[in-house]
């Protein structure tokens, strides 16, 4: 197997843009050429990497695994460049960011990059078990996740947003017309849960435990399949306000969960001892300002 770095870079951009034509324009090649490159990559790995939905494409489970590793590869390359340049961190225009839910922050990060074309943001998706792995986190400038996910005291949180809990249901569900509901009322519902390892799944398990019940889980899936199963009436799902907004699907309704269930405190973490570059400070302030 001989994976080409350029092909992995094209894959990374396509995964983040979720649009073939826009990605092809960004890297100045034709859409058929980009499609052919991705097909070769899928053939090389002997797996499919994307699900096609109309004009948009989204990573499937295989794609999410590859995306996480590809982000690590490019983060390592950035680290090599920094070290070979004598560690001139203050002037760097490359920012490495780990997120536990890619869909939540795509809009804010994408808008920042649009407004700051001279700054490169390398985003990687992190599972819970990597959040306190120093070998991994030392490569990052920032981590965006819930306040309680990181126990390493070398990382300092700055609050972005108090992210309230919600239930996601389709328009035919009995909760669809409700403004609020207690999580305990949903104890007998079939839940579509995110796969174990996601920070949002950890939040779901904790919230159900606090409400005094073990959820009936009918499926454990990724973010995209979760939406489809909700629409098909297979079950309901537990999420947050940001998670709902990231769906952008008018056929999925959100019902706020009452105050007995704690909100998520979404934070951007930075290393206490690290000297942030001007670009990194600008990025942190922008992300926080987006949700003020």
Image: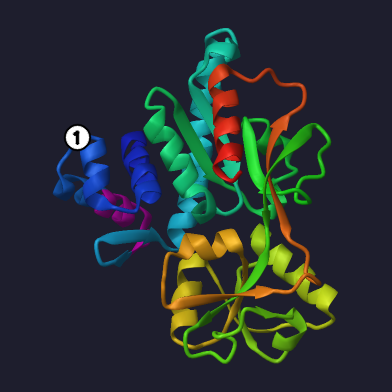
| Quarter-of-image position of residue 276 | top right
Image spot of residue 73 (x, y percent): 50, 36
Near-viewer residue (42 or 264)? 264
Would you say residue 50 sits in the magenta stretch?
A: yes
Q: For the point 49% across and 88% down, which residue is it?
A: 233
| Quarter-of-image position of residue 4 | top left
Q: In this rendering, is residue 270 above or below 178?
A: above
Near-viewer residue (113 or 135)? 113
Image spot of residue 36 (x, y percent): 20, 50
Tell me the element at label 1: loop
Image spot of residue 271 (x, y percent): 73, 29
| Quarter-of-image position of residue 151 | top right
Q: Residues within 10 Å of mark 1 (few under 14, many from 20)?
A: few
Taking the image as drawn, is residue 192 in sight?
Answer: yes
Q: In this rendering, is residue 1 above or below 84?
A: below
Q: For the point 17% across and 48% down, which residue is it?
A: 31
Badge 1 is on which residue? 28
Range of residues picked out in magenta: 38-51
Q: In this rendering, is residue 266 above or below 177?
A: above
Q: For the point 61% across and 43% down, which residue is it?
A: 292
Q: For the point 32% across and 60% down, which residue is it?
A: 57
């Amino acid at each position: 197997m001989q994976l080409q770095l350029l092909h992995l870079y094209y894959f990374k951009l396509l995964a983040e843009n979720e649009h073939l034509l826009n990605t092809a324009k960004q890297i100045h090649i034709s859409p058929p050429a980009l499609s052919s490159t991705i097909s070769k990559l899928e053939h090389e790995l002997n797996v499919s990497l994307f699900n096609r939905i109309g004009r948009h494409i989204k990573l499937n489970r295989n794609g999410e695994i590859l995306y996480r590793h590809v982000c690590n590869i490019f983060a390592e390359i950035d680290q090599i460049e920094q070290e070979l340049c004598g560690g001139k961190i203050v002037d760097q225009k490359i920012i490495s960011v780990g997120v536990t839910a890619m869909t939540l922050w795509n809009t804010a990060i994408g808008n920042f990059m649009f407004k700051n074309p001279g700054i490169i943001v390398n985003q990687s998706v992190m599972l819970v078990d990597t959040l306190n792995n120093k070998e991994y986190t030392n490569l990052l400038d920032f981590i965006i996740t819930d306040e309680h996910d990181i126990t390493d005291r070398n990382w300092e949180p700055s609050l972005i947003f108090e992210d309230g809990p919600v239930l996601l249901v389709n328009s035919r569900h009995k909760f669809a017309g409700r403004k609020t509901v207690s999580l305990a009322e949903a104890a007998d519902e079939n839940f579509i849960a995110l796969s174990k390892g996601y920070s949002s799944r950890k939040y779901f398990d904790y919230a159900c435990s606090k409400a005094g019940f073990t959820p009936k889980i009918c499926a454990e899936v990724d973010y995209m399949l979760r939406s489809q199963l909700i629409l098909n009436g297979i079950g309901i799902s537990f999420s947050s306000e940001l998670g709902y907004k990231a769906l952008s699907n008018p056929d999925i309704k959100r019902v706020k969960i009452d105050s007995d269930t704690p909100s998520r405190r979404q934070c951007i973490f930075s290393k206490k001892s690290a000297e942030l570059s001007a670009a990194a400070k600008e990025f942190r302030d922008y992300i926080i300002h987006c949700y003020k």
